[in-house]
Image (spheres, grey):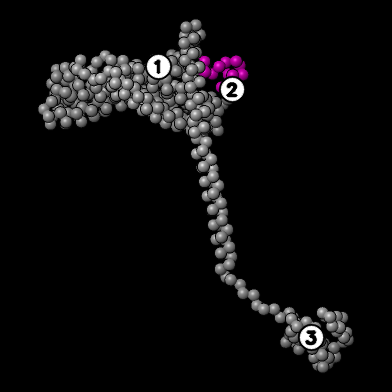
Amino acid sequence: MEIGDRPVRERPLTGQSDRDELQGQLLSAAPGLAHDEAADAHPGGAVAVLDRPPVEVDPAGPQTDRFQASTRAVVNGLGKAASRAASKAGSIPSTSVATTGRGVLLAAKVLRYAVTDTLTLRLPFGELIIQAWTLLKVTALPAVLMAIPFGAMVAVQVSGLVNEVGANSLVGSITGVAVLRQGAPVTAGLLMGGAAAAAIASDFGARAIREELDALRSLGVDPVRRLVVPRFLALQLITPILVVIVIAMGVGAAYLIATVVNDVTPGSFWLSFGAFAKMVDVWFTLGKGLVFAAIVAIVSCQRGMEAKGGPRGVADAVNASVVLNVLLIIVVNLAITQLQTMFFPMAVA
């Protein structure tokens, strides 16, 4: 037998001298081996063990490794989230332009079908009447409930101001201008952009999820012609009704507050109202309402028809249609008001 480069004598160990000799040979052949003190307890043999330096174990090592691993995971997750957010933010302009383009094309198609089908009597008048009644039911009562507080609020604020200068007779004129020029069209537009838009978008979204729109296309029926146009014209029909309701309720509430609470005579209220409110204001109010109705119909139908992803997609389509309608109504109202002020300034009738 050899250990390292030195031969070791192979014979039975019979005495203490033989064990000492074997230990010396082992130590000289492998310096890393040391005699085990327990060898003396085993007669007839010896045990050699490797003399290694003790390994120091850091008790905080596993916790440090876990902390570093969790830190790396968090950093990687944040990096991926940041990259996704950056890519999504970069795609917003192109997505917005594409959505606007589809909306413009849908509006052009709806206007073409609305004119041609009405003239050729191909318009589904039954569907038109049903949709107009349905949309009127969900917007008429909210119009009354919104118009009365609006007119009363204007009368209360104005009365406190004109009493300071002794011009109580101007309450009717200020109330008339506020309700007629801004209150009626904006209230009607917001009602259509809220209740009516939610109803239209949810209807189209449910049809899109159930693939009814695809089924109509496969049968050769255009969903725009069959479904969108009747809802577009229905909103146009109910807009004058909503505007008249808001004007009547708003001015009536202002009249009651001014005459009962602030001691304004009825004659002075109506005289000042007629002095500043003109028919051109009524026509502008109706025009605003019709524009708002067209915006609500196009946006709501488009968002509903493009819904996908199950019930969550329908909810997202409804939320998007309501938000877009409200923003567009506010912006368009500002633009039309500016044009009205430029070309038809307010003056005593």
Q: Residue at x 52, y 15 (%)?
A: 225
Q: Tell me which segment is drawn in magenta.
A: 213-226
Q: Nearer the viewer, mark 1 or mark 3?
A: 3
- Amino acid beneath label 2: Asp
Horizontal and vertical percent position of residue 67: 55, 61
Q: Quadrant of the N terminus?
A: bottom right
Whole-number angstrom distance, CA of label 1 to CA of label 3: 109 Å
Classify mark 3: helix, strand or loop: helix
Label 2 secondary element: helix
Q: Residue at 67% across / 78% down in the picture? A: 53
> Of all residues shown, which one is farthest toward the right?
11
For badge 1, the amino acid type reads Gln
Tell me if residue 342 can be seen.
yes
**Crowd band around label 2 with a 10 angstrom C-alpha radius: few (<14), some (14–19), many (20+):** some
In the picture of the structure, the residue carrying the numbered disc 2 is: 214
- Report the disc number at residue 28: 3
Is 220 part of what is drawn in magenta? yes
Residue 227 in view in this figure: no
Say whether marks 3 and 2 touch (CB < 8 Å).
no
Q: Earlier in the sequence, mark 3 or mark 2?
A: 3
Principal secondary structure, stretch drawn in magenta: helix
